[in-house]
Amino acid sequence: MKVWIKYVIGIVLGIAAALLLPTDVPAVSTAIVTIQEFFVRFGRYTLLPLLLFGVSNAVYKLRSRKMMARTGAWTAAVIVGSSLIITAVGVLSILLVALPRIPITGEKVTEVAAIDIKSLVMRLLPYSSFETLLDGAFLLPVFLFAGLIGGGCATDETASRPVIVVIQSAYRLFYSIMTFFVELLSVGMIAIAAYWMMSAKPAFAAKTFMPLTVMLLVDFVLIVGVLYPVLLRLICKDLRPWHVLYASICPVLAAFFSGDANLALQVNWRHGRESLGVHSRVSGVTFPLFSIFGRGGASLAAAICFVVLLRSYSPIGLKVFDVLWIFLVSFGLSFVLGGIPAGAPYILLTVLCTAYSRGFDASYLLLRPAVPIFCSFAAAIDAASAVFGSYIVGVKTQRIEHIDIKHYI
């Protein structure tokens, strides 16, 4: 059975459980929350060792074959380009379609979230490089550590041969373990989907956020179902762009219902290799970098939500300066969300509200009930971007082995 079918079955069972079980009973809701947290941890469990040895192996191979600059340039260009396109789609859609106002409430601010860029920079270089293996949220430090190991091995291959053998053996081992965890996560999707439905149920019941949900759905379909296949046709001259969309079904489902970029990373990684045939030397670099920096979905969701809040508070139309400010700040801050694998769009929305000020500092509280919905769409768009982006890099660097669609996992 295809992996994505197993995930669909788990998701359907989870949603049914959330609708049928008395989730308003504390014991039931607590059980769902506990089981969901267990499986999110389960989904992340093998990530750091896989990342350490996978990135080391990929960087070693790229450097030894003098492909590092080309692969890095294409990866950076696709990440920046996709984030730019996604943010532009979000801003244009909310400017063209005026969503209904969100009713104003008198809720008070208790704690303001922020993006601490200084802290992120300091976490890149802890006092001991081994401390990078202790942080399961911010993946960039361990990526840099692994890159140094792989790059060092490529400098003197003869002296590093024993280390290279260990790295490649460990990578194959942890990749095999990861495939087992990805398979079992289909069972965990029951609890993850049940928790998502339980969290989103109040927003659906209120019906206030349905227009916002529809807009996010339309943007998702436009980006993933139309724009990305067209870009594949133009950039890669691919006559079958829909097969990449098919390969992204499982990663998109995992990302949507978990809302967790780190959990979705392993699902992405496996489908990129075993369905699309992206070589390990490319997939070992592109998928982690997309998970860390490719957060255009968060930028889109935050920009749309922020404009909705502005229009809810004031009937005055947006000026050109305001539109440019929203676009540039959302786009720019999307690259520093790597330390927030889950809930990043809401954090970004909070930062936009507090930075814009003018009496809108606490306006983000109006959308707190809809957080599970717009964070899910953001994560799904980012997961699809990683699959399509890694495929483009694989094609342009000629490090891809095309697999017949009937053999996709």
Image: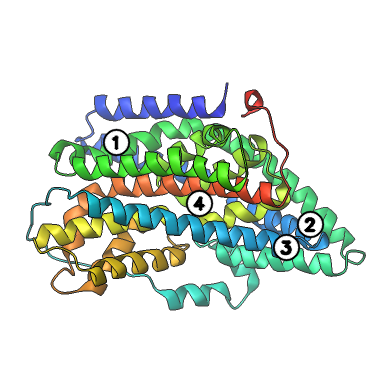
Residue 353 in percent (x, y) is at 23, 67
Horizontal relation, residue 365 to residue 190: left or right: left
How crowded pointer 4 is (Cα within 10 Å; few <14, some 14-19, many 20+) is rated as many
Q: Give the mark nearest the N terminus, 4 or 3.
A: 3
Q: Residue furthest right?
A: 158
Q: Nearer the viewer, mark 1 or mark 2?
A: 2
For disc 4, the marked residue is: 262
**Which residue: 38% across, 57% down?**
87
Q: Label for residue 197?
A: 1
Question: Three-letter amino acid code at disc 1?
Answer: Met
Residue 380 location, x and y as percent?
42, 44
Q: Nearer the viewer, mark 2 or mark 4?
A: 2
- Quarter of the picture holding the C terminus: top right
Tell me the quarter of the picture where residue 267 sits: top right
**Which label lies toward us, 4 or 3?**
3
Mark 1 residue crowding within 10 angstroms, few (<14) / some (14–19) / many (20+): many
Residue 61 disc label: 2
SS assignment at label 1: helix
Question: Front-most of 227 and 19?
Answer: 227
30, above or below 58, in the image: above
Distance (Cα) linking label 3 and label 2: 9 Å
Mark 2 to mark 4 CA distance (whole Å): 24 Å
Residue 68 tag number? 3
**In the displayed structure, does residue 338 sit left or right of residue 168?**
left
Asked if residue 360 is positioned above or below residue 50 in the image, the reply reads below
Question: Alpha carbon of mark 1 to alpha carbon of mark 4: how far?
Answer: 21 Å
